[in-house]
Amino acid sequence: MDESIVSAVQDDLTGRYLTFYIEDVIYSLPLNHVIEIIGIQHITHIPSVPYYIKGVVNLRGKVVPITDVRLKFGLPERPYDDKTCIVIVMINDMHIGLIVDRVAEVVTLEKMNTAPPPTNERRMGDSYLDSISTLSEKIILNIDCMKFFQTDLAELFIQES
């Protein structure tokens, strides 16, 4: 693909985020990491992985690991419903699925309405935040994808070696 086209697409995605809910809290992921959104499907369990990694799915011939965001944030598991879905993201050329309670919308977040997250060593989920934004009087917690997957990616690369 022409580098100028790739650059134009990246510029168009700057400041754009996919928002989703975990319980009543709105989170977001940078849109440039999001590949697609799929419904819940059969997940094959894999032994000896962290409890929040539900397993893998076959996505058009590609094996994709699936992480339950609720569990990674230390929240209780809940039954999946018709709004539960999997957001497929790409991190370091690897597709990874995130189970979320429900997807909300794609938004543009302005830097002037964004602040760094407060530090709180007791809550593990805070360490995954890049920033906190406000949009139409809603609070949005912006996830840093590299921080969110840092431990998991390290384990995957060690296992592949």
Image (cartoon, rainbow, N blue to C red):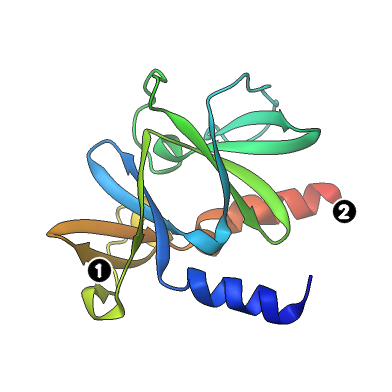
The disc labelled 1 sits on which kind of residue? Pro
Q: Which residue is mark 2?
A: 161
Q: Which residue is mark 1?
A: 118
Residue at the far right: name it.
161
Q: Is residue 45 left or right of residue 116?
A: right
Whole-percent x, y for residue 18 in the image = 41, 53
Q: Residues within 10 Å of mark 2 (few under 14, many from 20)?
A: few
Q: Is residue 84 left or right of residue 25?
A: right
Whole-percent x, y for residue 42 in the image = 62, 18
Could you tell me which residue is drawn at 32 percent across and 61 percent down? Answer: 121
Quadrant in which the N terminus is drawn: bottom right
The disc labelled 2 sits on which kind of residue? Ser
Image position of 99 with respect to 3: above or below: above
Q: Nearer the viewer, residue 134 or 146?
A: 134
Whole-percent x, y for residue 127 in the image = 40, 61
Whole-percent x, y for residue 80 in the image = 42, 20
